Amino acid sequence: MRRDELHYDLPPELIAQQPASRRDASRLLVLDRGTGRCRHGRFDQLADFLPDRALLVLNDTRVIPAKFAATRESGGCVRGLFLRESALGQWLVLLQGRGRLQAGQKLTLGDAEASLTLTHRGERGAWQVEVAPAMPAEAILARCGCTPLPPYIRRPGRRSAEDEADRERYQTIYARRAGAVAAPTAGLHFTDAVFGALASRGIELVYVTLHVGQGTFAPITVDDLAEHPMHAEWYELPAAVADRINAVRSRGGAIVAVGTTAARVLETCAEEGGTVHAGTGWTQIFIYPPYRFRAVDAMLTNFHLPGSTLLAMLYAFAGVDLVRAAYQEAIAQRYRFYSYGDAMLVI
């Protein structure tokens, strides 16, 4: 597949800048792969569109306030994005500021009363830094960090009342395991009422973890997708969850991945025949046509950026022509796109 096949034209006003007034008030486009038909509803009607005996697999990662501002010893400002904590007091971060950054430089996190010392620069421009005092990253960022919204959502870039609202809405209601720097956005629409409706139909839920990394926003820059260097993300699929998925599949139930992140975990852990195994580690799986899915029967997702690995995955799952037609239908119907936008169920 070629990069230009992932292009489509989106009116800028359809890029959602704010979440829906209520999580489950988002619109829902339902694409049937068998018939090619698109139906339209609301997310609070999700249970009505899912197949019987379905099992939803959700990603319980929790977004941390990973964006921060630091000050050089000269007084200059440096903007940062926390990526991960390799050990206590050892962070991997992206940094941007005027003037060159050099190993040995010290930056101050004022609100957190902490400092970062640059040790060395690694792959893709990320810096390894030493943090003093050596406290858990989540505790430090809770005091000085902002919600790491994607670049297409316009915000002032500092802590504010709007950032406090984003901290709540750019997070699923079932987020549990901190470590993501981007939300698994297909899960943002769920409410307790939606979960209740699913339970009343006998639709089960299980949870996996994939800590979404900043690479999820990285555009494909090579012409041939086979040459794209896919980013790595940490995942875990517990043994009890694997057993439940396999049991549902054995009785003919549908496995529904809630988001591309849950789909990545399932396909990473799946055998050719669809059986999944417990596992944990780093996945670099890159799914694009003509990939054949092993463990996912239906997928709930948001509308993705042109030229993205996420759109390539959706092409592989539903077919290029069907997805293109569905996206044009969504544009014509004025759906809201991207992270704070509406949802799409592919069955």
Image (tube, rainbow, N blue to C red):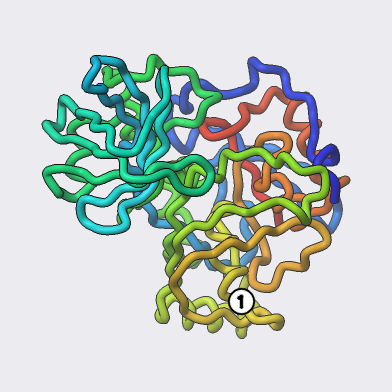
Q: What element does badge 1 sit on?
A: loop
Query: 196 or 100: nearer the eye?
Result: 100
Determine the residue positioned at 30% across, 25% down: 69
Residue at image coords 23%, 32%: 106
Q: Which one is nearer the viewer's eye here, 116 or 135?
A: 116
x, y percentage for residue 172? 39, 45
The answer to which quarter of the image holds residue 316 is bottom right
Q: Quadrant of the C terminus?
A: bottom right
Locate residue 46, reporting x and y percent. Answer: 56, 48
Residue at position x 24%, y 16% in the image: 74
Q: Amino acid at mark 1?
A: Ala
Name the residue located 45 percent from the left edge and 48 percent from the top edge: 194
Compared with 59, 324 (above or below) is above
Q: Residue 261 lies in what quarter of the image?
A: bottom right
**12 w.r.t. 307: above or below:** above
Q: Position of residue 334 (x, y in %)?
A: 69, 23
